[in-house]
Amino acid sequence: MKCKKLVDVGRRQFLRGGAMAGVGAAATMMTGAQAQAATPGAQMDYPSTKLANIADLAVNEPVDIEFPDPDSPGILIKMGQTVEGGVGPDGDIVAYSVLCPHRGWYMNYNGEDRTLNCPGHFSRFDTEAGGQQVWGHATQNVPQFTLRVDDGGDIYAEGASDLIFGRPSNVL
Ligand code: FES
């Protein structure tokens, strides 16, 4: 009797595993459009937008920006040391959305610990680590904008790492 129960449990777990494998197989059969929707920062046609010139920036003093359109506020910062996603001669210039990925509150930059801080429910994001969440309710990191610097030191935004809050797509 005891042995039969063990066999039944084993069979149920096997069947459950099979069902999960089926779900996994279905997930891998997404179309290209579905896959793009699932990774909103990927393969999008972003406008190349000039944000500032390197000469305009001072270490740890954020400049307000808008990208990819005026309804998407952000900041551009020279961190003073090489950081994740940083561009420029020192690899230290980064840009982020300031809309909290939790519920879209405007976030403030804290120059002391170099985080973006949300006044809504107090989430915090590390601007030296690609916008990684270090505390709070959000379920994703804050979007980091992809930057390029030309030979004249002009800085352009040309992409985003994650979905900007409140949008079905980063480019509307
Ligand atoms: S809106 Fe930012 S933590 Fe909730």
Image: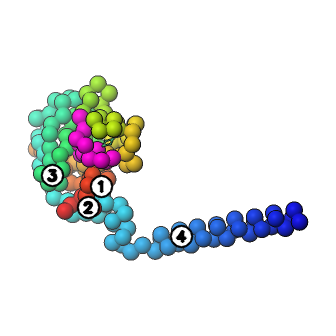
Q: Rate crowding at label 4 as few (under 14), some (14 to 19) or many (20 or more) other CA atoms within 10 Å.
A: few
The label number, if any, that marks residue 169 in the structure image = 2
- Give the vertical position of 11 relative to 51 (above or below): below
Specify the amino acid type for callout 2.
Ser
Percent of width and height locating residue 34: 36, 70
Badge 1 element: loop
* Contact between labelled residues 2 and 1, with CB atoms less than 8 Å apart: yes
Q: Earlier in the sequence, mark 3 or mark 4?
A: 4
Range of residues picked out in magenta: 97-108
Q: Mark 3 = which residue?
A: 71
Residue underneath mark 1: 163
Give the residue displayed 39% in from the left and 42% down from the top.
Answer: 137
Give the distance between the C-alpha atoms of the residues marked 1 and 4, in whole angstroms: 25 Å
Q: Which mark is residue 23?
A: 4
Disc 3 from disc 2: Cα separation: 13 Å
Rendered view: 14 above or below 48: below
Residue 135 appears in the picture as rendered: yes
